[in-house]
Image: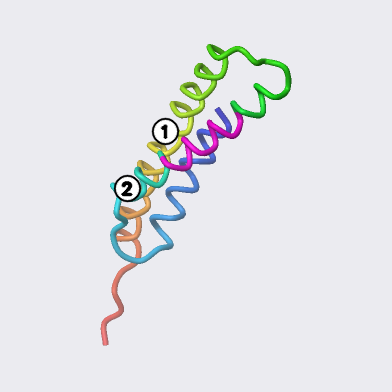
Amino acid sequence: MVLDLIALIAGIMYGYLKPGKEDKKALLKKGLLIGIIFSILFAGLAAIAGRSSLMFFAGSIIAIIIGVLFLTVLFIIGTFIGDWLEVKFKAPLKA
């Protein structure tokens, strides 16, 4: 729950502070890639730590990918909110 909120707030800050619209598709691809890397790493560490079952290894990978993908989607929703706030509150300076 806390990690979900952190991902959403980080997305809002990223969308608000970074000028212009963010490429949501690229963010999703990057998040999925990071999820796959972390899931293989953590599942491998769990397998080394004594859980050597192939089923446990595969289940860990799938669970971590789904978790990271969910956090990535929350981050992207946050960037939508941040982009909207940027347009709403950062009025262009008129010379």
Quadrant housing residue 90: bottom left
For residue 23, side relative to residue 65 (left or right)? left
**Disc 1 on helix, strand or loop?**
helix
Q: Which residues are magenta?
A: 33-42
Q: Magenta: predominant secondary structure element?
A: helix
From the image, tell me which residue sits under label 2.
80
CA separation in Å, label 2 and label 1:
17 Å
Query: In terms of depth relative to the viewer, which is nearer, 78 or 50?
Result: 50
What residue lies at 32% left-to-right and 47% top-to-bottom? 80
What residue lies at 49% left-to-right and 21% top-to-bottom? 63
Tell me if residue 37 is in the magenta stretch.
Answer: yes
For residue 85, side relative to residue 44 (left or right)? left
From the image, tell me which residue sits under label 1.
69
What kind of residue is marked 2?
A: Phe
Tell me if residue 20 is in the magenta stretch.
Answer: no
Count of numbered marks: 2
Asked if the residue at tag 1 contacts the one at tag 2, i.e. Cβ–Cβ closer than 8 Å, the answer is no
What kind of residue is marked 1?
A: Leu
**Disc 2 on helix, strand or loop?**
helix
What residue lies at 46% left-to-right and 29% top-to-bottom? 65
The single residue placed furthest to the right in the displayed view is 49
Q: Quadrant of the C terminus?
A: bottom left
Name the spot of residue 82 as percent of width and height, x first.
Answer: 37, 52
Of circles 2 and 1, the one toward us is 1
The crowding category of the residue bearing disc 1, from other C-alpha atoms within 10 Å (few below 14, some 14 to 19, many at least 20), is many
